Image (cartoon, rainbow, N blue to C red):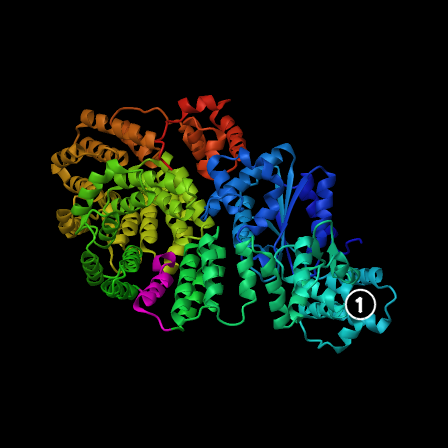
C-alpha cells in the first residue's frame, strides 16, 4: 500500500541511505500508529536497492528486563565475525550476549566499542543500515550501546534509523541522531488514505472515522473495521486506547483456543513460533500447530513467518494482554515457565509474573538473576520485582536499597530516588537508613544540597560506624568530604568531618584517608599527606582506584606534578575496564594539573576527551570543571574570545549549583584574559574575588594556588599593599604545609613585591626545585628579567628574558611570549617570530590521535584507547597529515614529542 502524506520524510530517508546526506542517523518520533514503521520498511527497501546491508532490532516490552536482548537480535547475524575482535572487546561482547561462560557484568562501554568495531569492519565490505524500532522498549543495556555507536559512526559507512514514541525516554534521544517528528496527516491525505482502505464507507461513518482517527494512519486503516465498537466508545478516550479497544474487540471474536495461544504469544519475550506453540500446548493440555493461530492471521492481528510470530502492531500485543483476566495471564506465564527450564533468566521473570502474592522462593531467584545480570539496568529491574515478592519488610527493604545502589551506579537518579522512597515506607535498620541517606546524597557529589548537610552526614557516618557498618560509614564520610571540596561549610564543619575520619581507625597512609584529609584540611594535613604521596609515587599502576584517590589528594594539596602523575597512572586502568565515569574524573584532574604546570599541548586533548566523556556519562559538573580547563588553555594561548565563551559556559553550570572550584577556575581565566589584554585593574579584581570568603568563587585551597597571577596583577595595578596584606594572611597556611603550588606562588609574590631589594628573593625563588613546573619557572625568569632591566642591569636581564621567551614559546603561552619579546627589544635584542608548534595546528581530538600514532600505536590500538573504531582513526589521520605537511604516519614521531605511555 502506498504511503500517504510523507513525501518530505521519504526524500530525507532516501538521502540518508543513498549517500546524498551527511547525517549519520535519524530518529523518527511520533505517537503509536502514526506511520513510523511504514517509513522504516520503505527505507529498508530503498537501502537494499542501493546496495546496503540491513541489520534490524526491535524493542519488545516483555524483553525490557533482559539485558542486551535487543543487541543480540541486531548482531547475531554477524556472529561469525566476532572472532576478529580484539580480545577485551570479544570477551565483553560475548559475555553481554550470553555466548560465553564468563559470569558477571561487562563494561557497557567496552560492549559498545565491540559493537562499533564489528559494525565498522562489516561496513567496510558493504555499507550498513542499522535499524532499531521502538527503542523506548529496548532493554536499557542495548539502548545504551546503540547510543554509544550512534555518536561514533559519522566517519563510517554506517547509518542508523531508529523509532521512538512520543513522551518516552531512551538514550538514543541524546545520541546525536537527527530528529524527524511525525505529526498527523493533513486532511486531504487522511481522506485519500481512507478512500484507499475503505472506499465503501457510508458518509456518516466516514465522518466519524476521520474525526476519531485525527490523521493517524493506523487508525484510518483499522477503525473502519470496528464501527460497531466505535459507536459505543466514549469520544474522549485517547486514540491509543481507542485503537486497543478495536484490536481487543477483534481478538474477542476469535475461537477460545486461538485466544489462549495468542495470549501466550503476547506474553512471551520471544517470537519463536515453536516456543509459542509448545507453551500454548501446555496451557491447552494438548499439542497444537500453527492452525490454532490461523484465525488471528485472518483477523489481521498477527503474521506468521517461517519460524516467527509477529504482531501487526505493538498495540495489538498490549491490547490482548490488557484485556485478559489476571488468572488467564497467570496461567499463560506458568505455561512458559514449564517450557523455559533451560533458560533460567527468562524463566524467572515468568515465574514472577505468575506468582500470586508474596513468594520468597521466586524473590530469591530474581535476586540471583540480578547478580548474574550482564547489565545494571536489568539487575535493578530484577531486584525491584524481587522486593515486591519479598515475604518480610526487612528483605523487601534490602532489595529495594540494593536496586537503588545499582541505579546510582548507572546514573539513574529518578529511579534511585523512587526506590529509596519506597524503602523508607518500611521499618529500616540503622544500616539500611544509612544506606538510604548515602544513596540519595551520592549524585553530583551532593552539590545541589545545603552545606549544612555536610555536618549531618559526618554525624551519620560516626553513628553507622559505631553500629558496626564500616563500609557504608566510609562511603557516607567520603560524600561529606566531597561536599567540602565543592562548597565551603566553614572551619567548624571541616573539623567535625576530620574528627570523624580520625575515629575510623584507618591508617594515615590509606589512599582513602589521604583523599579525605586532603579535601577537608589541605593545609593542616598537607605535610602529612605530601609525605605519603611522595613515598607512594613509585607504586602506581597496580589499582586505578588507588591511583585516583592519590591523584585527588595531590591535587588538593597543590602538588600538581604528583596529581598529573597519579591521574595518568589511573586513566589506563579505567579506560581498559570501560569505566568511563571514573575515567572522566581521572582525566579531569590530569588536564587541570597539566594546564597549571604549563603543558598545554598535553592538557588540551585530555581536557577535550574528558569533556566528551563527561557529557556521555551524565556528569554536568565535571563537564563544567573541564570546560574551565579548556578556557584556561585558550587564555594562555592568547585566544581570548574562545576563553571568554568557554568561561561563560562553565559559569552557567557552576553558579546554578554553587560549584566553587568551577567558579574559582573561571575567575582565574578571567584574570588571565585581563592580564593578556593589559587590563590590570580588572585582572586584580577578578583574581582577588577568589580570596573573598563572601564570593561564590571563593575556594579555600585553590585561592592559595593562583598567587603568581594575582601578584603580577597587583604589581601592575598598583595594588601592592593589598597583595602584601593578603600574603600575610596566608603565612600560617604556608608554615603548616610544604604545598608546592602555595610556596612557588609565595616566593614569586615576595620577589615582585620587594622593589629594589628583589634580587635576593628572585634568586631564592629560582633556586627552588621547579622540576616539572616549567610555566612557573618561565614566569620567574620573565619577572626577574623585567626587574633587572628596570634596574638598568640590561645585559643581565637579557639572559632571563631570553629563557622566558624560549620557555613560553615552547609552552605556547602567546601573551607571555610577546611580553618577553617586547622586554628583550627594550633591552636591545631582537627576537625571531615564533612559528606555531605543529600541535597547535590540530584540534584537541586530532592531537590525541596524532600523539598516539607517533608513539607507534596501530589504528586499532588507538581506537581501543579513545573508544573509536579503527576506521574513524584512519579517517582522522588522513585529515591530520596535510595539516602537518606530512604524507605518512612515519613522520609523526619526529614532528610530535613522545608522551609518556600512561598519559591518558
Q: Quadrant of residue 252?
A: bottom right
Q: Hey, which residue is sitting farthest right in the picture?
A: 200
Whether residue 74 is situated above or below residue 403 in the rendered picture: above
Q: Does residue 692 appear left or right of residue 902 in this picture?
A: left
**Above or below, 892 relative to 205:** above
Q: Position of residue 187 (x, y in %)?
A: 77, 63
Q: Quadrant of the N terminus?
A: bottom right
Disc 1 crowd rating (10 Å Cα; few below 14, some 14-19, many 20+) is: many
Tell me which residue sits at (29%, 54%) in the image: 485
The region drawn magenta spans 427-450
Q: State whether residue 242 appears in this view.
A: yes
Residue 717: image x %, image y %?
Answer: 25, 46
Q: Is residue 710 visible?
A: no
User: In the rendered structure, does residue 252 fall within the stretch colored magenta?
Assistant: no
Q: Predominant secondary structure in magenta?
A: helix
Position of the C terminus, as image quadrant, is top left
- Say which element carries label 1: helix
**Number of numbered markers:** 1
Q: Is residue 88 left or right of residue 729?
A: right
Residue assigned mark 1: 224
Amino acid at each position: 500500500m502506498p504511503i500517504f502524506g510523507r513525501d518530505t520524510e521519504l526524500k530525507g530517508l532516501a538521502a540518508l541511505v543513498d549517500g546524498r546526506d551527511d547525517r549519520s542517523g535519524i530518529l523518527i518520533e511520533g505517537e503509536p500508529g502514526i506511520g513510523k514503521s511504514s517509513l522504516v520498511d520503505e527505507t529498508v527497501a530503498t537501502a537494499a536497492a542501493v546496495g546496503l546491508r540491513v541489520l534490524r532490532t526491535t524493542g519488545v516490552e516483555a524483553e525490557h528486563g533482559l539485558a542486551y536482548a535487543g543487541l543480540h537480535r541486531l548482531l547475531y547475524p554477524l556472529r561469525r565475525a566476532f572472532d576478529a575482535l580484539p580480545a577485551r572487546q570479544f570477551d565483553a561482547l560475548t559475555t553481554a550476549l550470553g555466548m560465553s561462560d564468563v559470569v558477571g557484568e561487562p563494561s557497557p562501554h567496552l560492549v559498545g566499542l565491540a559493537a562499533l568495531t564489528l559494525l565498522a569492519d562489516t561496513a567496510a565490505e558493504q555499507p550498513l543500515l542499522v535499524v532499531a524500532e521502538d527503542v523506548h522498549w529496548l532493554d536499557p543495556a542495548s539502548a545504551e550501546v546503540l547510543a554509544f555507536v550512534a555518536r561514533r559512526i559519522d566517519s563510517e559507512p554506517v547509518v542508523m534509523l531508529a523509532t521512538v514514541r512520543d513522551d518516552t525516554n531512551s538514550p538514543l534521544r541524546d545520541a546525536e541522531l537527527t530528529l524527524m517528528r511525525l505529526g498527523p496527516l493533513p486532511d486531504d491525505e487522511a481522506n485519500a488514505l481512507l478512500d484507499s482502505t475503505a472506499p465503501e464507507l457510508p458518509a456518516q461513518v466516514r465522518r466519524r472515522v476521520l474525526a476519531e482517527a485525527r490523521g493517524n494512519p493506523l487508525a484510518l486503516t483499522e477503525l473502519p473495521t470496528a464501527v460497531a465498537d466505535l459507536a459505543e466508545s466514549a469520544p474522549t478516550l485517547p486514540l491509543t486506547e481507542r485503537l486497543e479497544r478495536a484490536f481487543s474487540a477483534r481478538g474477542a471474536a476469535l475461537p477460545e483456543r486461538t485466544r489462549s495461544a495468542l495470549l501466550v504469544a503476547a506474553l512471551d519475550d520471544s517470537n519463536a513460533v515453536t516456543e509459542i506453540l509448545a507453551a500454548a500446548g501446555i496451557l491447552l493440555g494438548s499439542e497444537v500447530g500453527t492452525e490454532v493461530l490461523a484465525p488471528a492471521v485472518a483477523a489481521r492481528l498477527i503474521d506468521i513467518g517461517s519460524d516467527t510470530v509477529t504482531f501487526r502492531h505493538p498495540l495489538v500485543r498490549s491490547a490482548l494482554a490488557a484485556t485478559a483476566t489476571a488468572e488467564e495471564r497467570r496461567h499463560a506465564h506458568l505455561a512458559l515457565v514449564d517450557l523455559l527450564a533451560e533458560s533460567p533468566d527468562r524463566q524467572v521473570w515468568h515465574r514472577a509474573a505468575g506468582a500470586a502474592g508474596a513468594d520468597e522462593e521466586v524473590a530469591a531467584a530474581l535476586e540471583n538473576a540480578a547478580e548474574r545480570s550482564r547489565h545494571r539496568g536489568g539487575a535493578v529491574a530484577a531486584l525491584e520485582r524481587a522486593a515486591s515478592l519479598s515475604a518480610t519488610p526487612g528483605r523487601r527493604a534490602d532489595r529495594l536499597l540494593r536496586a537503588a545502589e545499582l541505579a546510582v551506579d548507572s546514573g539513574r537518579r529518578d529511579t534511585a530516588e523512587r526506590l529509596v522512597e519506597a524503602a523508607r515506607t518500611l521499618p529500616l535498620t540503622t544500616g539500611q537508613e544509612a544506606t538510604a541517606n548515602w544513596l540519595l546524597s551520592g549524585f553530583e557529589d551532593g552539590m545541589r544540597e545545603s552545606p549544612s548537610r555536610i555536618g549531618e552526614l559526618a554525624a551519620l557516618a560516626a553513628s553507622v560506624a559505631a553500629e558496626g557498618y564500616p563500609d557504608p560509614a566510609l562511603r557516607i564520610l567520603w560524600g561529606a568530604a566531597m561536599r567540602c571540596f565543592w562548597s565551603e561549610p566553614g572551619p567548624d564543619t571541616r573539623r567535625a568531618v576530620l574528627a570523624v575520619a580520625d575515629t575510623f581507625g584507618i591508617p594515615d597512609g590509606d589512599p582513602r584517608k589521604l583523599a579525605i584529609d586532603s579535601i577537608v584540611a589541605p593545609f593542616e594535613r598537607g605535610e602529612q599527606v605530601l609525605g605519603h604521596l611522595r613515598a607512594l609515587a613509585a607504586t602506581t599502576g597496580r589499582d586505578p582506584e588507588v591511583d585516583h584517590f592519590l591523584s585527588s589528594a595531590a591535587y588538593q594539596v597543590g602538588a600538581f606534578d604528583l596529581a598529573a602523575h597519579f591521574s595518568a597512572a589511573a586513566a589506563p586502568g579505567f579506560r581498559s575496564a570501560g569505566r568511563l565515569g571514573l575515567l572522566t574524573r581521572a582525566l579531569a584532574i590530569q588536564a587541570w594539573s597539566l594546564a597549571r604546570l604549563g603543558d598545554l599541548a598535553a592538557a588540551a586533548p585530555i581536557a577535550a576527551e574528558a569533556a566528551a566523556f563527561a557529557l556521555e556519562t551524565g556528569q554536568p559538573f565535571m563537564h563544567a570543571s573541564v570546560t574551565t580547563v579548556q578556557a584556561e588553555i585558550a587564555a594562555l594561548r592568547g585566544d581570548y574570545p574562545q576563553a571568554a565563551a568557554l568561561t561563560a559556559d562553565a559559569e552557567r553550570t557552576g553558579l546554578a549549583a554553587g560549584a566553587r572550584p568551577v567558579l574559582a577556575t573561571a575567575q582565574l581565566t578571567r584574570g588571565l584574559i585581563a592580564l593578556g589584554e593589559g587590563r590590570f585593574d580588572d585582572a586584580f579584581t577578578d583574581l582577588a574575588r577568589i580570596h573573598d570568603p563572601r564570593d561564590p568563587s571563593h575556594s579555600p585551597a585553590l585561592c592559595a594556588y593562583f598567587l603568581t597571577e594575582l601578584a603580577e596583577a597587583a604589581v601592575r595595578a598598583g595594588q601592592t599593599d593589598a597583595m602584601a596584606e593578603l600574603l600575610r594572611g596566608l603565612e600560617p597556611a604556608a608554615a603548616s604545609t610544604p604545598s608546592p603550588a602555595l610556596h612557588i606562588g609565595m616566593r614569586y609574590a615576595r620577589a615582585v613585591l620587594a622593589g629594589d631589594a628583589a634580587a635576593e628573593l628572585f634568586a631564592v625563588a629560582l633556586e627552588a626545585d621547579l622540576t616539572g613546573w616549567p610555566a612557573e619557572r618561565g614566569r620567574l625568569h620573565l619577572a626577574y628579567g623585567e626587574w633587572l632591566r628596570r634596574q638598568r642591569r640590561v645585559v643581565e636581564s637579557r639572559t632571563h628574558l631570553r629563557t622566558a621567551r624560549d620557555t613560553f614559546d615552547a609552552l605556547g603561552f602567546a601573551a607571555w611570549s610577546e611580553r618577553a619579546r617586547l622586554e628583550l627589544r627594550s633591552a636591545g635584542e631582537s627576537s625571531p617570530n615564533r612559528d606555531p608548534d605543529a600541535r597547535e595546528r590540530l584540534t584537541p581530538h586530532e592531537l590525541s590521535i596524532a600523539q598516539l600514532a607517533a608513539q607507534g600505536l596501530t589504528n586499532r590500538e588507538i581506537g581501543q584507547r579513545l573508544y573509536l573504531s579503527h576506521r574513524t582513526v584512519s579517517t582522522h589521520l588522513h585529515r591530520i597529515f596535510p595539516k602537518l605537511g606530512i604524507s605518512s604516519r612515519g613522520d609523526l614521531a619526529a614532528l610530535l614529542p613522545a608522551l609518556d605511555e600512561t598519559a591518558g
